[in-house]
Image (cartoon, grey):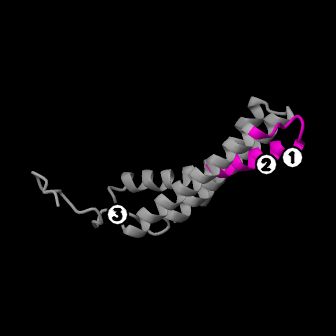
Amino acid sequence: MRVLPFPRPEPLDSLVMEPRDRLANLALFAAAAVVWILVGFVVTTRDPSVDPGAGFLGAGLIGISVGLTAMPLFWLSVFARNRRIAYRGDWIRAVRRGAWVGVVVFVLVVLRLQGLFQVPVALFILAMVIVAEAALSGER
């Protein structure tokens, strides 16, 4: 056993972050990594011009992977902003916001694949999501 020349300020499983929160973050990042590998496989092996379903499959996988990647990032940003205090409902908001990000990415990729993507449409979609999230996240 190696002894460090200086003591650690706090042990690994400290009261700063609950082990269940750490496990949830790692699980979401691991799930996102698996889906990103699937995205790489679909993008490199299937051509949407030959197989129309490949575009929707790729868009779905990209939306899921971006959403899964965003969920722990949203939770960690709120956790850091609240000075390392996790409040009740933080995970629900983080999952909801990650799902919004995944849906928006899916819709934008599908619009791009269909040749229907336009900046005003994308800005309208983003504005609708921001308004919906603001309404759902309002402090009571």
Residue projecting furthest to the left: 5
Q: Which mark is residue 130?
A: none
Question: What residue type is disc 2 on?
Answer: Leu
Query: Which mark is in front, 3 or 1?
Result: 1
Label 2 element class: helix
Amino acid found under the numbered disc labelled 3? Met
Q: In the image, residue 97 lies at what x, y percent?
A: 59, 54
Q: Earlier in the sequence, mark 3 or mark 2?
A: 3
Main SS type for the magenta part? helix
Q: Position of residue 64 (x, y in %)?
A: 67, 52
* Rendered position, 42 above or below 32: above
Mark 2, other Cα within 10 Å: few <14 / some 14–19 / many ≥20:
some
Q: Nearer the viewer, residue 34 or 16?
A: 34
Return the residue at label 3.
17
**Residue 138 drawn above or below residue 63:** below
Residue at point 17% right, 57% down? 9
- The residue that mark 1 highlights is 53
Q: Which picture quadrant has residue 46?
A: top right
Mark 1: give few (<14), some (14-19) or many (20+) Cα within 10 Å.
few
Q: Residue at x 44, y 65 (%)?
A: 23
Amino acid under label 1?
Gly
Disc marking residue 57: 2
**Magenta-span inclusion, residue 130:** no
Q: Please state the extent of the stretch shown in magenta in the rendering.
A: 45-65
Residue at the spot 73% in from the left edge and 46% down from the top edge: 106
Query: What residue is rendered at 38% in x and 51% in y?
Result: 81
Q: Residues within 10 Å of mark 3 (few under 14, many from 20)?
A: some
Please indicate, yes or no, whether residue 11 appears anywhere in the rendered image: yes
Secondary structure at badge 3 equals loop
In the rendered view, tell whether residue 65 sits above or below residue 25: above
